[in-house]
Image (cartoon, helix red, strand yellow):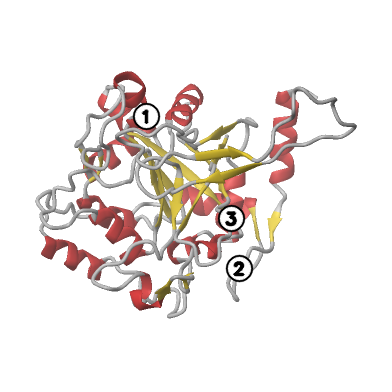
Amino acid sequence: MSTQSWTKGFALVMSSVVVMGCTPGADEAPVSLNELEPAVADYRPPVVSPESHDLTQEDIERLIEELSNWGRWGPDDQIGAANLITPAKRLEATSLVTEGITVSLAQPLLITEDVDVPSPFEHRMLGVPDLDAEPAFMGGVSDNYGISYHGYSHSHLDALCHIMYKGKMYNGVSQDTITEDGCSNAAIDNLRGGIVTRGVLFDIPRLKGVPYLEPGTPIYMEDLEAWEEMAGVTVRPGDAIFIRTGRWARRAERGPWAVSESAAGLHASTMPWVKARDVSFLGSDAAADVAPSQVEGVGLPVHILTIVAMGVDLFDNQNLEDLAETAAELNRWEFMLVAAPLPVRGGTGSPLNALAMF
């Protein structure tokens, strides 16, 4: 069967699919793709008043209150804004797969220590064939992996228990609930069912006509809305958005630098926009925050406002170069996102290989 024929067949099958499971709400009925189309077409994003670009610690504390999703999904909620990914949202995402193309968002694991890789990935073989021995009837090898994934090196997903502010994590849970055994609330294993939703790429260097943003460049709400207009795409509730700064392209051309000290990224003033759009996950090719943060006394305000206040998990250090190239070739900036973090009980996050499907 040709690719074109397969695509047509897939689209025909998907038009009649009904999604039943994946923990829908008690009152949520099965939804067909045909029922979704009018709602998607009629969606109009809310208008958001711009925040000042000169934010203070007091402004961040005000935004924590204003943007809070604490209690929105109940006092015992474990997954935050991932609740926005309903069966209907997953079904919407499947309709975006029309070409049969998959793209990895993972940066190949870095094995050499450098200024931006303080903890390289460790790969140790546990046995290799003896070249001097007669080959056995059946042989095999195994290996051991070691990774410290938080930081600015390896592609990973932050759990909601990863960040606290003034002793509180998402939903007002005390940091005292975290022990040597791990997180008893909002740990990464609560996402063991995987993430399937509509993804949207924001290629900010393409917007600005440059191959990559220079370290320390802030991205403002005006940039996000300008990209939507230029790309002809609109973020809708439950979407996962990925912000390309060109970090890996710059590293390939100019070498490593201390990303933790200087990185292009979102300014904290973009967070009311993220909340108003009901984003489920936020990803970037660094760690989301512009560095330095440009907020005196607050090092990672985007981390605080997403993870702690809104319950939005972060995909950090994604390599968005192949995604940007594929999206540009197809002139399509939306895709189906598929991601499956490791179900580590009590874990604060997980390395992972997220996929974009077109």
Query: Is residue 322 something that shows in the picture?
Result: yes
Q: List x then y, in percent, for residue 308.
A: 33, 65
Which quarter of the figure is the N terminus placed in? top right
Q: List x then y, in percent, for residue 122.
A: 50, 40
Q: Element at badge 2?
A: loop
Q: List x then y, in percent, for residue 246.
A: 33, 29
Give the residue at the far top of this rendering: 253
Depth check, mark 3 against mark 1: the one in front is 1
Q: Element at badge 1?
A: helix
Q: Quadrant of residue 230?
A: top left
Q: CA distance from mark 2 to mark 1?
A: 38 Å
**Which numbered marker is on residue 24?**
2
Q: Quadrant of residue 307?
A: bottom left
Depth check, mark 2 against mark 1: the one in front is 1
Which quarter of the figure is the C terminus placed in? top right
The residue that mark 1 highlights is 248
Q: Which badge, 3 or 1, is on the more N-terminal residue?
A: 3
Give the residue at the far front of this rendering: 132
**Which numbered marker is on residue 194?**
3
Look at the picture and state if 126 lies above or below 79: above
Instruction: Report whether 21 appears left or right of 103.
Output: right
Q: Which badge, 2 or 3, is on the more N-terminal residue?
A: 2
Q: CA distance from mark 2 to mark 3?
A: 14 Å
In depth, the one of 245 and 347 nearer the eye is 347
Depth check, mark 2 against mark 3: the one in front is 3
In depth, the one of 332 and 318 nearer the eye is 318
Three-letter code, disc 2: Pro
Look at the picture and state if 113 lies above or below 347: above
Crowding near pointer 1: few (<14 within 10 Å), some, many (20+)?
many
Three-letter code, disc 1: Trp
Q: Element at badge 3?
A: loop
Instruction: Report whether 38 appears left or right of 52.
Output: right
